[in-house]
């Protein structure tokens, strides 16, 4: 019975903590493949791998110097940085969604549009998405192993099954991406990154509010906001998220209006 419990806990920890990061990486990889730049995927994977190494180092620091407790403020900073990059890439994809411009000369346009700065941004998103979850996951697993029989068969089996499940979801997203028309692929990926950025802003507020650096007001908050994980349940976080959403909507409408009057926006600009 204990082995079964360890298996379930190990699976849940890795799958839950890794799901969000995997979805981000899978979405970015699928986008690059559809954009005709599969050779630009390597920096994303390198960013994720670097985050794993950084997570191991950070987990060691927390374990040795902070008794295994992570820093709420450190997590908040990572979340805000990740959100900013996601908002940037979301807007970048939204502006470059015109399929005629991409399909006219896909390889050449991809080379121009996916310049070094854009690729570094994608790698940065991958790094922050994995790093945000990494150290916490390692600490959880370490605590689970320490409280049980170490990294035994049950724990390792749970991690292995979670890894396979995440890999299967990754492959499924790549398969689906190749069956979506180009414009919806751009729009869906843009919207996904934007929503992930909004979610991280809410989580960053949670971390800061736990340190009582920002007030936490919940009176009159609709229950579905927290139940649907739209925000952290405070008016401060929700107000900030709505303000960002309003700015994005206005910017999107202005972009569409400009495209309607001036023709398709250029795919890349030096």
Image (cartoon, rainbow, N blue to C red):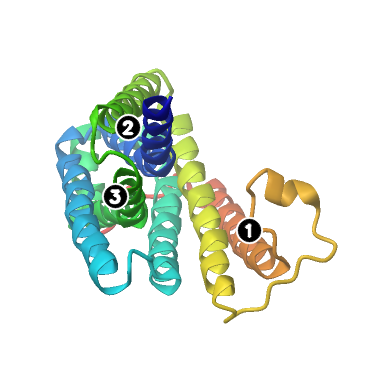
Horizontally, residue 81 falls left or right of residue 234, namely left
Q: How many marks?
A: 3
In the image, is residue 146 above or below residue 88? Answer: above
Q: Secondary structure at mark 2?
A: helix
Label whose residue precedes the other's in the sequence (3 or 1): 3
User: Is residue 40 in view from this perspective?
Assistant: yes
- Residue indicated by mark 3: 142
Question: Which circle marks residue 232 in the picture?
Answer: 1
Label whose residue precedes the other's in the sequence (1 or 2): 2
Q: How far is disc 1 from disc 2 in space, using C-alphas? A: 29 Å
In the image, is residue 236 above or below residue 35? Answer: below
Residue drawn at x 33%, y 64% as measured from the top left: 68
Q: How far is disc 3 from disc 1 in space, using C-alphas? A: 27 Å
Q: Are marks 2 and 3 in contact (CB under 8 Å)?
A: no
Give how far across and how far down residue 154 sits, in percent: 30, 27
Q: Secondary structure at mark 1?
A: loop
Residue 29, quarter of picture: top left
Residue 56, quarter of picture: bottom left
Horizontally, residue 214 falls left or right of residue 27, namely right
Residue drawn at x 54%, y 77% as measured from the top left: 211
């Amino acid at each position: 019975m204990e082995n079964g419990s360890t298996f379930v806990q190990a699976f849940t920890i890795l799958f839950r903590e890794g799901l969000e990061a995997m979805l981000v990486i899978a979405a970015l990889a699928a986008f690059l493949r559809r954009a005709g730049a599969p050779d630009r995927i390597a920096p994303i994977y390198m960013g994720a791998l670097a985050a794993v190494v950084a997570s191991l180092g950070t987990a060691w620091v927390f374990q040795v110097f902070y008794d295994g407790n992570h820093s709420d403020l450190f997590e908040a900073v990572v979340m805000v940085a990740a959100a900013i990059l996601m908002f940037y890439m979301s807007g970048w994809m939204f502006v470059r969604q015109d399929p005629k411009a991409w399909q006219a000369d896909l390889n050449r346009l991809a080379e121009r549009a996916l310049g070094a700065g854009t690729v570094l941004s994608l790698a940065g998103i991958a790094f922050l998405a994995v790093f945000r979850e990494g150290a916490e996951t390692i600490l959880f697993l370490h605590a689970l192993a320490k409280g049980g029989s170490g990294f035994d068969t049950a724990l390792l089996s749970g991690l292995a099954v979670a890894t396979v499940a995440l890999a299967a979801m990754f492959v499924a997203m790549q398969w689906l991406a190749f069956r979506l028309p180009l414009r919806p692929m751009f729009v869906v990926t843009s919207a996904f990154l934007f929503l992930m950025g909004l979610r991280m802003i809410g989580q960053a507020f949670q971390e800061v509010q736990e340190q009582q650096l920002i007030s936490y007001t919940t009176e009159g908050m609709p229950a579905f906001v927290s139940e649907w994980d739209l925000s952290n349940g405070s008016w401060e976080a929700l107000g900030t998220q709505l303000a960002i959403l309003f700015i994005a909507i206005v910017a999107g409408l202005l972009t569409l209006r400009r495209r309607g009057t001036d023709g398709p926006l250029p795919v890349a600009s030096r």
